[in-house]
């Protein structure tokens, strides 16, 4: 199973692709889609959508996993994040892929085993689990963590429903 994990953001959207082969998790690719903060939101959303569409076409994932919105102090930032999530979800749905959502707590539990883990701990575990030579860029590392969470969750779902 090939999984595209997405850490949405209106300025930087991280993506990470992994493949689950039996009990092994293999790193395929990761990166960050950067938009200009001064650009109109609609133009930034278009870039996010088009770049994710390109990644999906290039790597043909079987599923998309995306991080859910956290409670933000700034309502305007939360709205922009919601729009970025929508663009990312639409890229997956338009490619006829199942889209799963996970909270930050679920992702941390799946990767580190502790829902209150610090970002650095998550990044280090992602590097170790995927045998990366170094810690990936922050947003890409977060996206890889979301993909790992889905790989573990998909396995648990399969165990529950043989």
Image (cartoon, rainbow, N blue to C red):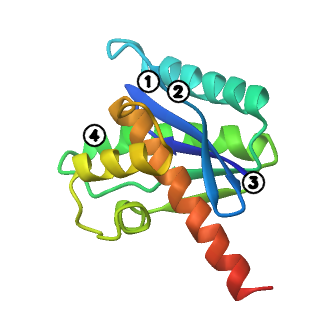
Which badge, 1 or 4, is on the more N-terminal residue? 1
Q: CA distance from mark 1 to mark 4?
A: 12 Å
According to the image, label 3 marks what residue?
1
Question: x, y (%) of residue 62?
Answer: 77, 49
Q: Quadrant of the N terminus?
A: bottom right
Residue lying at 40% horizontally and 27% vertically, measured from the top left: 12
Q: CA distance from mark 4 to mark 3?
A: 36 Å
Q: Nearer the viewer, residue 61 or 68?
A: 61
Q: CA distance from mark 4 to mark 2?
A: 15 Å
Q: Are marks 1 and 4 in contact (CB under 8 Å)?
A: no
According to the image, label 1 marks what residue?
41
SS class, disc 4 = helix
Q: Are marks 2 and 1 in contact (CB under 8 Å)?
A: yes
Residue lying at 47% horizontally and 51% vertically, measured from the top left: 129
Q: Are marks 4 and 3 in contact (CB under 8 Å)?
A: no
Q: Nearer the viewer, residue 159 or 93?
A: 159
Front of the two marks 4 and 2: 2
Q: Are marks 4 and 2 in contact (CB under 8 Å)?
A: no
Which badge, 4 or 3, is on the more N-terminal residue? 3
Question: Hey, which quadrant is residue 34 in on the image?
Answer: top left
Q: Nearer the viewer, residue 74 or 31?
A: 31
Question: x, y (%) of residue 153?
Answer: 58, 70
According to the image, label 4 marks what residue?
76
Which class describes the residues within 10 Å of circle 1: few (<14), some (14-19), or many (20+)? some
According to the image, label 2 marks what residue?
45
SS class, disc 2 = helix
Which badge, 4 or 2, is on the more N-terminal residue? 2
């Amino acid at each position: 199973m090939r999984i595209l994990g997405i850490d949405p953001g209106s300025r930087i959207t991280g993506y990470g692709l992994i493949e689950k082969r039996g009990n092994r998790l293999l790193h395929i690719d990761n990166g960050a889609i950067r938009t200009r903060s001064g650009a109109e939101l609609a133009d930034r959303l278009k870039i996010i959508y088009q770049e994710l569409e390109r990644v999906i076409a290039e790597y043909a994932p079987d599923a998309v996993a995306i991080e859910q919105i956290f409670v933000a102090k700034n309502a305007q930032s939360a709205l922009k994040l919601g729009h970025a999530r929508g663009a990312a979800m639409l890229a997956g749905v338009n490619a006829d892929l199942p889209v799963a959502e996970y909270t930050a707590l679920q992702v941390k539990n799946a990767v580190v085993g502790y829902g209150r883990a610090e970002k650095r701990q998550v990044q280090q575990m992602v590097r170790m689990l995927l045998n990366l030579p170094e810690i990936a860029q922050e947003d890409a590392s977060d996206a890889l963590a979301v993909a790992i969470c889905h790989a573990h969750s998909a396995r648990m779902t399969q165990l529950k429903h043989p």
